[in-house]
Amino acid sequence: MKSTFSKKFRSVQKFCADFELTERVNYMLQKLSMQAFDHSSEILVYHDFLLFALAHPKDKNTLTLAEKELKRLTLHFRKSKNGQNPLFEDTGLPHTKMITRYSHDLTRWMIQSNWKMQLDSYEEGGTELNEILKATLPSLLREETTAGLPNIELLKHLGIKPKDQLRF
C-alpha cells in the first residue's frame, strides 16, 4: 500500500514531537521532502511547522531544509488543480483562493510596496463613493456628490490627482 503524505507526516510527527531535538527535526524534513503532497489538512499543519522552523531554526541545515520544503509546497500549489482545492481556500497558502477585505492603509502600503495581486471579483453591494464622500466632505464640496458622476469623474472633479487615487 502506497504511503500518502498525510500518513507519513503523522508518523514522522510523532517521532519528532520535541522540536528541541535538531536531528529529529532534520530527519522529519528529509523524509517528508521525498513524499508527494496529497490534499489533506496535514499540509496546513506542515506549513505552520515550516514557518516555525524558518523563524526558529536550530541549525543551518534546518533552515535550508525548511526553505526547500516551502518552495516545494509553493510549486505544488502553483499547479491550478492543487491551488483550487476548497480545503485550502482562505488559508493564506500561496496560489490558493483567498477572500478578504483590505483597509485603506494596507491597500496604500501594498501599492507603495509594488505588490502584485489579482482581484477576481469585488463585492458590488458596497457603499458607493458618492455616498461615502457625502458624509465626509466639507459642506462646500458636498454638492459634487449629488451630480451622479462615475467614481473616476468625481475624483477628477474634486481635484484628486491621479497619483493620489487608489487603483485596482
Image (cartoon, rainbow, N blue to C red):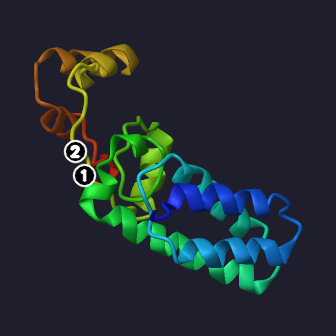
- Residue 92, image x and y in percent? 48, 49
Q: Is residue 135 visible?
A: yes
Residue at point 81% right, 58% down?
17
Q: In screen coordinates, is 126 left or right of 90? A: left
Residue at point 54% right, 55% down?
6
Q: Is residue 46 above or below residue 140?
A: below
Which of the image's four quarters has the N terminus?
A: bottom left
Say what secondary structure mark 1 lies in: helix
Q: Quadrant of residue 150?
A: top left
- Residue 2, image x and y in percent? 45, 65
Tell me, for residue 78, which label it has, or none: none
Residue topped by disc 1: 162
What's the amino acid at mark 2? Asp
Tell me, for residue 120, which label it has, or none: 2
Q: Is residue 23 above or below residue 10?
A: below
Which is in the foreground here, disc 2 or disc 1? 2
Q: In screen coordinates, is 163 left or right of 61? A: left
Cβ atoms at labels 2 and 1 below 8 Å apart: no
Mark 1, Cα crowd under 10 Å, few <14 / some 14-19 / many 20+, is few
Furthest-right residue in this view = 20
Viewer-proximal residue among 108 and 55: 55
Q: CA distance from mark 2 to mark 1?
A: 23 Å
- Residue 9, image x and y in percent? 61, 60
Say what secondary structure mark 2 lies in: loop
What's the amino acid at mark 1? Pro
Q: Is residue 66 visible?
A: no
- Residue 63, image x and y in percent? 70, 78
